[in-house]
Each structure stands twice: as structure tokens, then as C-alpha cells.
Image (cartoon, rainbow, N blue to C red):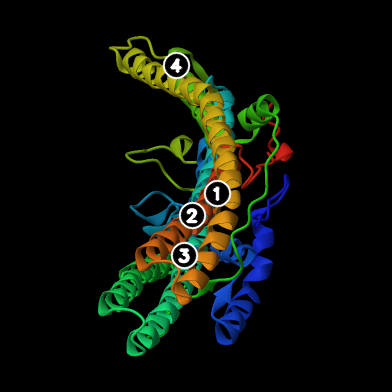
Amino acid sequence: MKPRVLTPGTRWRSTTILTLFIPVLIASFAQIGKAITLDMVLQTTLDKNPAIAQAKARLEEAAGERLVLRSIMWPDAKVGVPAGVQGGYRAGESATKGFGFARGSFVQPLFNAAVPPSRRRGDVDLLIAEQQLNITVVEQLHTARLAFYTALYNRELQSIREDQRQRLEQTVASQNDRYEAGLTDRSALTSATVQAHELDSQIESARRAGVAAQLKMAEVMGEALAPGAGPVGAEGELQFARMIVDLNAETASAQKRRADLKLARLLVRAANEAERIIEAGYYPAIAAAVSGEYIPVSGIHREDSTRRTEDLSSEIRAGAVYTWRVVDNGKVAGAASKQRAAREINELTCRKLEANVSRELLRIHNDLEMIEGRQKSLAAASDAAEQSAHLVEQNLAGGIASQLEYRLTETGFLETKTGLLDAIYQHNLAVAEWDRATGRYFQFSEDTALNLH
């Protein structure tokens, strides 16, 4: 069973449309058979997983930080309205009068070397948050998928062993009839009974492992279990489908598609822009400044003034502000050197991740080929073991075969059938790993409106 692949251009906002009816569908499945398909597991995980919700919140936070980084290029305007009461005697004036006036200033940066890297850093930080969201989505979807396969595997394993126990119990009944008829001794009956009961612990282990996988699936899906209610089961069966892939082409696609590689490259870009922002302290900053005061009345005096010519009046002033750090004292150079080291570390990590892609895909490809060969041999061996088990069972009923021969045959049949199921299970896990390693869970489409190039 293949997972639904999210194609380029898929936006996370579209998933909120499904949040209204997904719980209804899950509830209906729970009422009918308490089972859920893989597609519903992945969709519910996408909609309700707590880790994904936190990553989406961090994306919104990054959008706010982007505004802060861009704010250094915007003008700074201030308006104040001082007011008060002025007292004192002057010729022709009252002793006390109230006053108020408006005071404003406007500063527009004209040149600041930190503006371009700050703009780029804000854009890159937003992309970093989006890729972190993508990585979280990949991790949670992959975990949910593995839990789903594990639940299917243990359910089928439990079914195989229960069928085997049922066959052995039929043999116990047959041996009991033969013992009562005096056709066999008590040791044959005891041996058949012991063989049937040996499967009890294996069936219980498979049941517990299946319940644990279901609980993990519910946890990743963000589903809260009602008191007394069991976990939702997995619907479907494990399937084996041979994969034919072009390793070189898939490796090249994975280099472009994987979210962790995109994040590593973005971290290098972000560190480079942070270094340029720090180094902007070496350069002068020039800003245009305009300030003014508006006084709606006359006769407002300056402090300690004795002449009317010193009265306050409306005025406007304009000019330029020029600042330049002359003495560094290591504040800029030291911070830039530290940031440069961080950028170099990010570059090494990025190259290491890119180099590991080909090795990881080669390993998974080899695992798939090995599992395929194992599945073919076990499928043929399982058919032969089943025929042999039926033949020995008939001979045992006729008193031709011994109980030891039957026990060995049934044990071999059970091991072969279990091995075949395990091969199919490992194949599904390897396919899931292949989808994760090639970046097929989610493909991020950059927002061209950011115009980062």
C-alpha cells in the first residue's frame, strides 16, 4: 500500500479544509470496525499531530521576525505634544497662561550596509522555518507509516500463529481419540498438547506488539483515546510489490528534493547574511533627518528669557545624520569572526549530508534487492512446506507418521510462513525508508513572491 505523495505546490493551508470531516470519518471507522487506512493515518497525522502544529506556529513566528529585520530600512517618525502652564509677569500679559505645541521628527536611512543582508536574512529565516516544518512533517508521517505497517505485521503474525495453534489443537483432539481407542500411547497425546500450547506465548507477544504499534499510531495522529476504549486498528494487508528504480536518477532528484538538504543550504545562507550584517558596522550610516515644532499661539517664552525676541515660535529643521565607527575594539571584528566560524561549520555539515545521500540510497537499494530475493525463496519454500505439512498431518491421522515428524514439519511450516511475512514486512519498511531518503513524503515549492534570487 503506497502512501499519498504530496506534490510540489501543496500548501499547508489547504489541509485545514479537511479538519472538519476527518474526525467524522475516523469516528465512523471506529464504530464500524475500529480500523483505519494508511491514507487516513497520514492525513490525520498531517492535520492533528502536535509536533507539526508547533512547527506551523514557529513558521508564523518567523514571519514576524522577518518584519523586525526589515524595519531598519523603514523611516522613523515621532510626534510629541508637550503642554503645560507658564507663569510670570511681563508688560501687557497675564500672570499665568497655559500652552501646548506639537513636536515631530522624521528620520529616513539613506545608506546602511546592513539593509540588504537584513532583507535577505528575513527571507531566508522564513524559508528555514518552512523547511523545518517540512522536516517535522516527514518525520511524523514516516513514524505513522512505520507504526501502521508494524500494526499490520503483528496482526497477521498473530493470525498465522492462531491458525497454526488451531491445526495443532485439531491434532490434539485426533490424538486423544486415538489414545482412547488404544491406537497410540499417552506420550503422543502429551507431545501434541505441549506443541499446541507452545504457541500461546508467541501469540500473546504478537498481540502486545500490535497494541503497542496501534498506540504509537494514535499518538502520532494526535488522537486522544476515550476512557475504556481501545486503540484504532490498521485496515488492510501487507503487500509485496517489486521496485525497479534508477539509482543515479533518484540520487540526483533526492539532492534537490530532500527537506533536510534544503535546510542545510539555507542555514549556510543565513550564516553568511548574519556575517554581512555584523560587518556592516565597519561602514558609515547616513540618514536624512527632518524635525519641527508647531506652536499654535504666540507669547510662549523660553526658560530664563527676558525679551520677546526670545519667545518660542514654529520652526522646521532638515539635515543629514552621519555616523561611522572609528574605533572597533574588537566588537565588530570578533563577532564577525565568530559568525564566520559558524558559517564554515554549516558548510561542512551541508557537504556531509549531500555526500551521505548516495550512500544511504545505495544501502536501501541493496536492502530492497536482498529482501526481494529472500521473499522469492521463502514464497516457494512456504508452498512446499504447506504441502508437506498437510501430507504429514494425513499420515499422522492414519498412524503412518510419528508425532515427532509431524511436530518438525509443522514447526518448519510455521517458521517458513512467518519468515515470508517478515520479508514482506521488511520490504514495506524499506520502501518507506526509500520514500523518506528520496524526499517523496513532501516536496517543497519555494514562494517565488519572495524574489530571493
Pinpoint residue 361: horizontal percent, then vertical percent. 56, 31
Q: Can you tell which quarter of the image residue 449 is in? A: top right
Residue furthest to the top: 326
- The dot on residue 378 is 1
Give 282 or 148, whichever is nearer the viewer: 148
What amino acid type is highlighted by mark number 2? Thr
Say few, some or many: other residues with alpha carbon within 10 Å of mark 3 (under 14 / 14 to 19 / 20 or more): many
The span from disc 1 to disc 3 (Cα, nearest Å) is: 16 Å
**248 relative to 399 in the view: left or right:** right
Q: Are marks 3 and 4 in contact (CB under 8 Å)?
A: no
The span from disc 2 to disc 4 (Cα, nearest Å) is: 68 Å
- The answer to whether residue 107 is seen in the rendering is no
- The dot on residue 416 is 2
Q: Can you tell which quarter of the image residue 180 is in? A: bottom left
Q: Nearer the viewer, mark 4 or mark 1?
A: 1
Residue depicted at x 60% and y 80%:
29
- Up-down relation of residue 204 to residue 385 (above or below): below
What amino acid type is highlighted by mark number 3? Leu
Kind of element beneath mark 3:
helix
Give 195 or 212, whichever is nearer the viewer: 195
- Up-down relation of residue 299 to residue 328 (above or below): below
Q: Which residue is mark 4?
A: 279
Dot 3 or dot 4, earlier in sequence: 3
